[in-house]
Image (cartoon, rainbow, N blue to C red):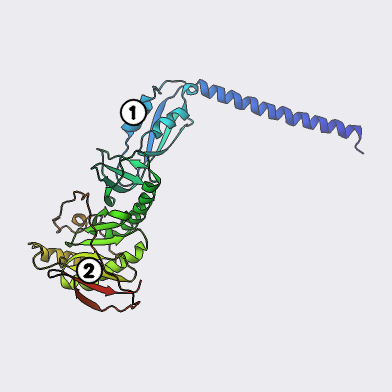
Amino acid sequence: MASPGNKIWNILGATLWFAMGAGLIALLLAAIQRKNNLSCKGVEIHIRNSGSGAFVDKKDVQKLIHDSGSNLIGKELKAIKIQKLEIQLKSNVWISGAELFFDNNEVLQVRVRERQPIARIFTSGGNSFYIDSGLAKMFPSEKASARVPVFTNFPSEASRWSERDSALLQDIKKISLFISGDPFWMAQIEQVDIASGNEFEMIPAIGDHTILFGGATDIEKKFRRLYVFYRDVLSKTGWNKYESINVQFKGQVIAVRRGAVENVQRSDTAKLEAILKQMMASSPQQWMGDDTLSRALPNYTATRSVAPRNTATPLKTMRDNDGTTTKSIVEKPASPSKSKTRIKMSG
């Protein structure tokens, strides 16, 4: 049993701790009150850009702050509504996040994160927009343009995505991230057309053919088959021999050969073949070009317009079900002016 003396000491100790705690709280409240009575001495803006281009600059941030009705410098700190300013900044479609706080010198620190576009999309109505990895829509800016894969013939003009739109955008995201992650395909794939049934057709920068890609499944395997076809066939036969190259069926590539009447004559064919052979000398993972052929290869002159095509007509294709995996080439006449070349391969 505790003695009366011990009880007194316990009470005194508890009282002392309580007094110290109350004193600290009072000091803290006094410091907060003193800080709130101070005035804002300045504003420092820091923008974390996406790397694709400065779509938001300091002038944009300053304008958004001033549009909120706040002339910050000289204003008492307690009168500045930081949360309201953050909401105002996030109203810009190119800003994904904003953080504001006062440092020890009464300077307002503004930290802004810019959205990172992953694809540019043209609608069937001729409008265009960017999307980021969260499928947020960002309209083009006069300040900069992002070097990202281009998709055309998007069917919707709605301001909000429907379930069907979201599913298509998810497919676009998968294909775009793969293309932009490989310097070879980023240089070679000029645009991607959205065909019926949410399938995709690709237009190459070099070679007068259409790549029938199908849906956004087995993306890596399809590009691998296309790469093997480029390396083992087109590098030997010429890049303009085929009208279409179909990689959507598992384990095979189907190519429709261009007829003599339809053959496209180009004065720079030899130059294009030499450039693509130079690119093919290294694997896609090792090729370290920039995102356009003109930047990666200074001697390359673009011969095709970048204007998006808003229509795409899939070509009929044939499929074998024999399960063979040989790499032999079989020529089968499809019409008096065309024939299909079929290559079987694993993967």
| Residue 155: x %, y % from top left | 29, 46
Q: Do the residues bearing badges 2 and 1 touch, measured as CB atoms within 8 Å?
A: no
Q: Which mark is residue 9?
A: none
Horizontal side of residue 73 vs 32, given as left or right: left
Residue appearing at x 22%, y 51% in the figure:
311
Structural distance between the alpha carbons of marks 2 and 1: 55 Å
The residue tagged 2 is 255
For marks 2 and 1 on the same chain, the one whose residue lies earlier in the sequence: 1
Question: For the N terminus, which image quadrant?
Answer: top right
Residue 131 falls in which quadrant of the image? Answer: top left
Residue 12 to residue 300: above or below:
above
| Residue 156: x %, y % from top left | 31, 44
Work out whether residue 322 can be spotted.
yes
Residue 138 falls in which quadrant of the image? Answer: top left
Residue 91 to residue 132: above or below:
above
Horizontal side of residue 9 vs 134, given as left or right: right
Work out whether residue 281 can be spotted.
no
Residue 53 falls in which quadrant of the image? Answer: top left
| Residue 12: x %, y % from top left | 80, 29
Q: Amino acid at mark 2?
A: Ala
Q: Nearer the viewer, residue 265 or 59?
A: 265
Label 2, residues with CA under 10 Å away: few <14, some 14-19, many ≥20:
many
Residue 119 to residue 187: above or below:
above
Q: Amino acid at mark 1?
A: Lys
| Residue 276: x %, y % from top left | 19, 65
Question: For the C terminus, which image quadrant?
Answer: bottom left
Horizontal side of residue 63 vs 292, given as left or right: right
Residue appearing at x 25%, y 66% in the figure:
317
Helix, strand or loop under label 1: helix
Q: Which mark is residue 63?
A: 1
Residue appearing at x 27%, y 67% in the figure:
227
Helix, strand or loop under label 2: strand
